[in-house]
């Protein structure tokens, strides 16, 4: 609710405010960032990795498939997805250009979820055997890999915090504030509104209604996929 020119909402813990994987500050959402590869991957593994082209909706791997590779998104977007007992689709992670995915299955015989392209994508395929060998032989690579996983854990915790916020209005505002960063107000959605809804645990219908209400109240401004926070919930 807007009260005396200030939005009053429950605040997320301070250490979890910068972990949501959206594009902040109005940057272009899907530029190719092949020069921003995960720094923990050694050059020998990168150079040997083939590139696979995915169409929108194409499955990169299925839950239960043998773990043969981890993946790095060159362009487009790929989500890690699971389905609950009721058949509802749960988005665990959404990887954009320069981000990698499926590392959690590297030391498991099978993938723990589905990898699905939400838009046309180019994905670099890093052989699991080669990555494991590099981690075993190079302590610096292993430490950098652990740091990358720690960042993913922080991101997951932030999404869990968001899903614990009961009202759609508060959840959307906090998700946008997290994506923008601590001082910015603009967020450019890297995917569709439906993708954003799935990432924060709302139906797309609930998200559309909430954004319309926030815009009508003057809490946000929208221009295409860019959303400006007029008043941050943590201000």
Image (cartoon, helix red, strand yellow):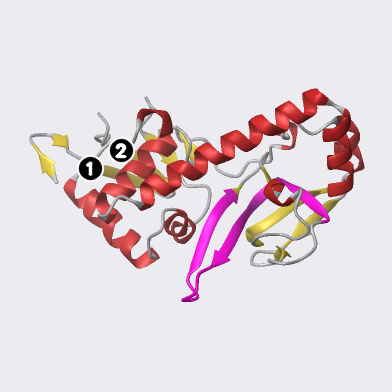
| CA neighbours of label 2 inside 10 A, class few (<14), some (14 to 19), many (20+) | many
Mark 2 vs 1: CB contact within 8 A: yes
Query: Does 78 lie within the magenta span?
Result: yes
Residue 33 visible somewhere in the drawing: yes
In magenta segment, residue 65: no
55 or 10, which is in the foreground? Answer: 10
Marked residue nearer the N-terminal end (2 or 1):
1
Rendered location of residue 59, percent (x, y): 70, 66
Disc 1 target residue: 219
Q: Which residue is rendered at x = 15% and y = 34% of the image?
A: 6
Whether residue 21 is visible to the viewer of this picture, yes or no, is: no
Picture coordinates of residue 172, whole percent (x, y)? 33, 49
Residue highlighted by disc 2: 229
Type of secondary structure dominating the magenta stretch: strand
Residue 152 placement, left or right of 55: left
How far across and down, in percent of the image, does residue 52 sit?
81, 55
Q: Which corner quadrant of the image does residue 38 belong to?
A: top right
- Residue for point 46% across, 59% down: 198
The quarter of the displayed image where residue 175 is located: top left
Left or right: residue 67 versus residue 178 is right
For this view, does 127 lie left or right of residue 26?
right
Mark 1 Cα shell of 10 Å, populated few (<14), some (14-19), many (≥20): many
Q: Residue 227, located in which quarter of the rendered image?
A: top left
- What segment carries the magenta color? 68-94
**Residue 88 badge:** none
At mark 2, the secondary structure is strand
Residue drawn at (43%, 38%) of the image: 179
Q: Quadrant of the C terminus?
A: top left
């Amino acid at each position: 609710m807007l009260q005396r020119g200030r939005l009053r909402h429950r605040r997320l813990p301070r250490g979890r405010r910068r972990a949501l994987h959206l594009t902040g500050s109005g940057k272009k959402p899907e530029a190719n960032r092949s020069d921003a590869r995960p720094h923990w991957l050694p050059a020998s593994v990168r150079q040997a990795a083939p590139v696979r082209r995915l169409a929108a909706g194409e499955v990169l791997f299925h839950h239960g498939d043998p773990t043969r590779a981890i993946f790095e998104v060159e362009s487009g977007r790929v989500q890690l997805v699971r389905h609950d007992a009721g058949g509802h689709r749960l988005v665990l992670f959404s990887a954009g250009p320069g981000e990698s995915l499926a590392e959690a299955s590297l030391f498991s015989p099978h993938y723990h979820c589905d990898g699905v392209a939400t838009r046309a994508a180019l994905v670099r395929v890093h052989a699991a055997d080669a990555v494991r060998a590099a981690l075993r032989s190079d302590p610096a690579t292993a430490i950098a890999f652990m740091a990358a996983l720690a960042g993913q854990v922080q991101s997951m915790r932030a999404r869990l915090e968001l899903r614990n916020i009961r009202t759609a209005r508060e959840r959307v505002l906090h998700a946008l504030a997290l994506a923008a960063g601590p001082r910015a107000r603009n967020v450019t959605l890297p995917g569709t509104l439906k993708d954003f809804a799935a990432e924060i645990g709302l139906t797309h219908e609930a998200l559309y209604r909430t954004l319309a209400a926030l815009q009508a109240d003057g809490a946000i401004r929208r221009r295409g996929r860019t959303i400006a926070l007029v008043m941050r919930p943590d201000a």
